[in-house]
Image (spheres, rainbow, N blue to C red):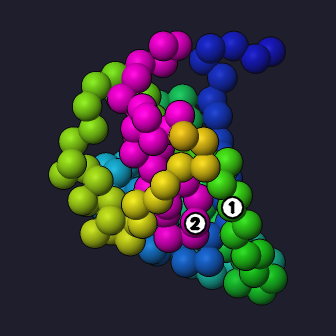
Amino acid sequence: MISAETHVRVARPSADPAAAERFYVEGLGLEVLWRTTERVAGEHDLVMVGLPGAGWHFELTRDPEHPLPPTPTVDDLFVLYLGGPIDPALVDRLVAAGGTRTVAHNPYWDRFGVTVSDPDGYRLVLCTRSWGA
Protein backbone atom coordinates (compact mmCIF):
# COMPACT_ATOMS: atom_id res chain seq x y z
CA MET A 1 0.00 0.00 0.00
CA ILE A 2 1.24 3.52 -0.77
CA SER A 3 1.82 5.73 2.27
CA ALA A 4 3.76 8.81 3.30
CA GLU A 5 6.66 6.47 4.11
CA THR A 6 6.78 4.92 0.62
CA HIS A 7 10.24 5.36 -0.86
CA VAL A 8 10.45 7.09 -4.25
CA ARG A 9 13.12 6.47 -6.86
CA VAL A 10 13.48 8.69 -9.90
CA ALA A 11 15.63 7.02 -12.56
CA ARG A 12 17.05 8.97 -15.47
CA PRO A 13 19.40 8.03 -18.27
CA SER A 14 22.62 10.01 -18.33
CA ALA A 15 25.03 10.46 -21.20
CA ASP A 16 27.77 11.02 -18.62
CA PRO A 17 26.92 9.74 -15.13
CA ALA A 18 30.13 11.20 -13.67
CA ALA A 19 29.14 14.69 -14.87
CA ALA A 20 25.60 14.28 -13.53
CA GLU A 21 26.99 13.03 -10.21
CA ARG A 22 29.27 16.07 -9.96
CA PHE A 23 26.27 18.38 -10.51
CA TYR A 24 24.08 16.75 -7.87
CA VAL A 25 26.81 16.02 -5.31
CA GLU A 26 29.31 18.90 -5.58
CA GLY A 27 26.76 21.42 -6.84
CA LEU A 28 23.56 20.61 -4.98
CA GLY A 29 25.02 18.85 -1.95
CA LEU A 30 23.47 15.39 -2.27
CA GLU A 31 25.47 12.29 -1.37
CA VAL A 32 26.32 9.16 -3.31
CA LEU A 33 24.17 6.47 -1.71
CA TRP A 34 25.33 3.62 -3.98
CA ARG A 35 27.07 3.02 -7.28
CA THR A 36 28.08 0.11 -9.45
CA THR A 37 31.75 -0.61 -8.94
CA GLU A 38 32.47 -2.85 -11.90
CA ARG A 39 31.23 -3.37 -15.44
CA VAL A 40 28.86 -6.33 -15.64
CA ALA A 41 27.82 -7.41 -19.14
CA GLY A 42 24.10 -6.89 -19.68
CA GLU A 43 23.71 -4.54 -16.71
CA HIS A 44 23.57 -0.77 -16.42
CA ASP A 45 26.20 1.45 -14.85
CA LEU A 46 24.47 3.52 -12.22
CA VAL A 47 24.91 5.90 -9.35
CA MET A 48 22.25 6.68 -6.75
CA VAL A 49 22.34 10.17 -5.22
CA GLY A 50 20.19 11.60 -2.46
CA LEU A 51 20.21 12.32 1.25
CA PRO A 52 20.80 9.54 3.77
CA GLY A 53 17.52 8.57 5.41
CA ALA A 54 15.36 10.47 2.92
CA GLY A 55 12.39 8.76 1.31
CA TRP A 56 13.64 9.43 -2.23
CA HIS A 57 16.73 9.26 -4.42
CA PHE A 58 17.87 9.78 -8.01
CA GLU A 59 19.25 6.86 -9.95
CA LEU A 60 21.42 8.01 -12.84
CA THR A 61 21.88 5.20 -15.34
CA ARG A 62 23.83 4.41 -18.48
CA ASP A 63 23.76 1.20 -20.48
CA PRO A 64 27.13 1.17 -22.27
CA GLU A 65 26.01 -1.64 -24.58
CA HIS A 66 22.83 0.15 -25.68
CA PRO A 67 23.10 3.80 -24.61
CA LEU A 68 19.81 5.63 -24.25
CA PRO A 69 20.26 9.35 -24.72
CA PRO A 70 18.59 11.63 -22.16
CA THR A 71 15.46 13.26 -23.59
CA PRO A 72 14.49 16.02 -21.15
CA THR A 73 11.73 18.46 -21.99
CA VAL A 74 11.25 21.98 -20.64
CA ASP A 75 8.70 20.58 -18.19
CA ASP A 76 10.81 17.73 -16.74
CA LEU A 77 11.47 19.42 -13.41
CA PHE A 78 12.97 18.44 -10.07
CA VAL A 79 11.66 21.14 -7.72
CA LEU A 80 13.07 21.83 -4.28
CA TYR A 81 10.84 24.04 -2.10
CA LEU A 82 13.39 25.86 0.04
CA GLY A 83 10.99 28.21 1.84
CA GLY A 84 13.20 31.28 1.54
CA PRO A 85 15.68 33.19 -0.63
CA ILE A 86 17.98 31.23 -2.91
CA ASP A 87 21.60 31.44 -1.81
CA PRO A 88 23.58 32.80 -4.81
CA ALA A 89 26.53 30.62 -3.72
CA LEU A 90 24.37 27.52 -4.30
CA VAL A 91 23.57 28.64 -7.85
CA ASP A 92 27.26 29.39 -8.43
CA ARG A 93 28.21 25.89 -7.19
CA LEU A 94 25.62 24.28 -9.50
CA VAL A 95 27.00 26.18 -12.49
CA ALA A 96 30.61 25.41 -11.52
CA ALA A 97 29.62 21.72 -11.26
CA GLY A 98 28.40 21.65 -14.88
CA GLY A 99 24.93 23.20 -14.68
CA THR A 100 23.50 25.94 -16.85
CA ARG A 101 21.29 28.73 -15.49
CA THR A 102 18.10 28.48 -17.55
CA VAL A 103 15.00 30.59 -18.12
CA ALA A 104 12.00 28.53 -17.04
CA HIS A 105 9.39 27.46 -19.59
CA ASN A 106 6.68 28.34 -17.04
CA PRO A 107 7.23 31.91 -15.78
CA TYR A 108 5.96 30.84 -12.34
CA TRP A 109 9.33 29.22 -11.66
CA ASP A 110 11.25 32.40 -12.59
CA ARG A 111 8.96 34.43 -10.34
CA PHE A 112 9.49 32.10 -7.38
CA GLY A 113 12.91 30.63 -7.95
CA VAL A 114 15.90 29.77 -10.07
CA THR A 115 16.14 27.07 -12.73
CA VAL A 116 19.41 25.30 -13.51
CA SER A 117 19.77 22.57 -16.14
CA ASP A 118 21.94 19.60 -15.19
CA PRO A 119 24.60 18.27 -17.62
CA ASP A 120 21.96 16.06 -19.32
CA GLY A 121 19.53 18.97 -19.76
CA TYR A 122 17.09 18.02 -16.98
CA ARG A 123 15.93 21.04 -14.99
CA LEU A 124 16.38 21.63 -11.29
CA VAL A 125 14.22 24.38 -9.78
CA LEU A 126 15.20 25.99 -6.50
CA CYS A 127 11.92 27.49 -5.30
CA THR A 128 11.66 30.25 -2.70
CA ARG A 129 8.21 29.08 -1.63
CA SER A 130 7.35 26.45 0.93
CA TRP A 131 5.63 23.23 -0.07
CA GLY A 132 1.88 23.78 -0.34
CA ALA A 133 2.21 27.57 -0.66
Q: Is residue 27 left or right of residue 10?
A: left
Residue 65 location (% of width, % of height): 77, 86
Label 1 sits on what residue type? Pro
In terms of depth relative to the viewer, which is nearer, 59 or 109?
Answer: 109
| First along the sequence among labels 2 and 1 | 1
Residue 34 location (% of width, % of height): 49, 56
Which residue does the numbered mark 1 point to in the structure image? Answer: 72
Whether residues under marks 2 and 1 lie with C-beta atoms below 8 angstroms apart, the answer is yes
Residue 47 location (% of width, % of height): 54, 62
Residue 72 drawn in magenta: no
Q: Is residue 8 above or below residue 10?
A: above
Q: Residue at x 32, y 65 (%)?
A: 95
- For label 2, the crowd category at 10 Å Cα-Cα, with few meaning under 14, some 14 to 19 and many 20 or more, is some
Q: Residue at x 21, y 48 (%)?
A: 88
Q: Is residue 5 left or right of residue 67?
A: left
In terms of depth relative to the viewer, which is nearer, 56 or 95?
Answer: 95
Residue 119 location (% of width, % of height): 50, 70
Q: Residue furthest bottom?
A: 65
Which residue does the numbered mark 2 point to in the structure image? Answer: 121
Q: Residue at x 45, y 50 (%)?
A: 115
Label 2 sits on what residue type? Gly
Residue 114 image-quadrant placement: top left
Q: Is residue 80 above or below residue 115?
A: above
Q: Is residue 51 left or right of residue 43?
A: left
Highlighted range, magenta: 108-133
